[in-house]
Amino acid sequence: FTCNNLNSMSFLKSTGKALGDVIPGLGRLTFDDNLGKIFVTSGTGVVGYRVAMSLLEQGQKDVRVGVYKGEREAGTSAGAGESDFVDNICRILEDKGAEVVDFDWTKEESQESALKGVKTVFCSLPHMDTSIDTF
């Protein structure tokens, strides 16, 4: 058996088999084509932004993107005082159809609000000096 340029979801769709059916010990993988509302964290980060844009460009209609809108540390992708960067990213995502929400890893109420009604989460952890305390 060879698998050339197929990911697990397209393999499942094209063959009706999960990779776990042909790879001993892998277990049964399933594919749910109803992803529901998708929440993507770190919408201003390289990974989070690209995942959100890819979902939107592929026609996902219900994408919520978490963006930290608080003060940023100097030296990060949006350093202190660079709110224009965040505003521009939010505008681009909203123009593509995303629901952009304020998301702060350190505030539980922010997490609860962002996850309300969400079925699928793509989680990309941010770089934070307080990561050890937060996670």
Image (cartoon, rainbow, N blue to C red):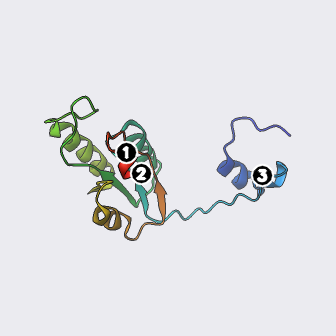
Residue at the spot x=61%, y=63% of the render? 32
Q: 47 or 25, which is in the foreground?
A: 25
Q: Which residue is the site of mark 1?
A: 131
What secondary structure is found at the residue carrying circle 3? Answer: loop
Is residue 97 visible in this depiction of the protein? no
Going from the N terminus, do you reach mark 2 or mark 3 first? 3
The correct choice, above or below, for 110 with respect to 126 in the image is below
> Mark 2 and mark 3: span between their CA atoms?
29 Å
Q: Is residue 92 above or below residue 106?
A: above
How far across and down, in percent of the image, does residue 43 sit?
A: 34, 46
Residue 115 showing in the rendered view: yes
Q: 15 or 28: nearer the eye?
A: 28
Total numbered badges shown on the rendered structure: 3
Choose top left, top right, bottom left or bottom right for residue 78: top left
For label 3, the residue is 26
Q: Are marks 3 and 1 in contact (CB under 8 Å)?
A: no
Q: Which mark is residue 135?
A: 2
Indicate the secondary structure of the residue bearing disc 2.
Answer: loop
Pick out the residue farthest to the top: 75
Q: Amino acid at mark 2?
A: Phe
The type of residue carrying mark 3 is Leu
Q: Which mark is residue 107?
A: none
**Residue shown at the point (45%, 51%) measured from the top left:** 123
Whole-percent x, y for residue 82 in the image: 16, 35
How many other residues sit within 10 Å of disc 2, few (<14), some (14-19) or many (≥20)? Answer: few
Nearer mark to the viewer, of 3 and 1: 1
The answer to whether mark 1 and mark 2 are in CB contact below 8 A is yes
Q: Quadrant of the N terminus?
A: top right
Q: Could you tell whether 133 is left or right of 4 in the image?
A: left
Q: CA distance from mark 3 to mark 1?
A: 32 Å
Sequence-first tag of 3 and 1: 3
Of 30 and 75, the residue lying toward us: 75
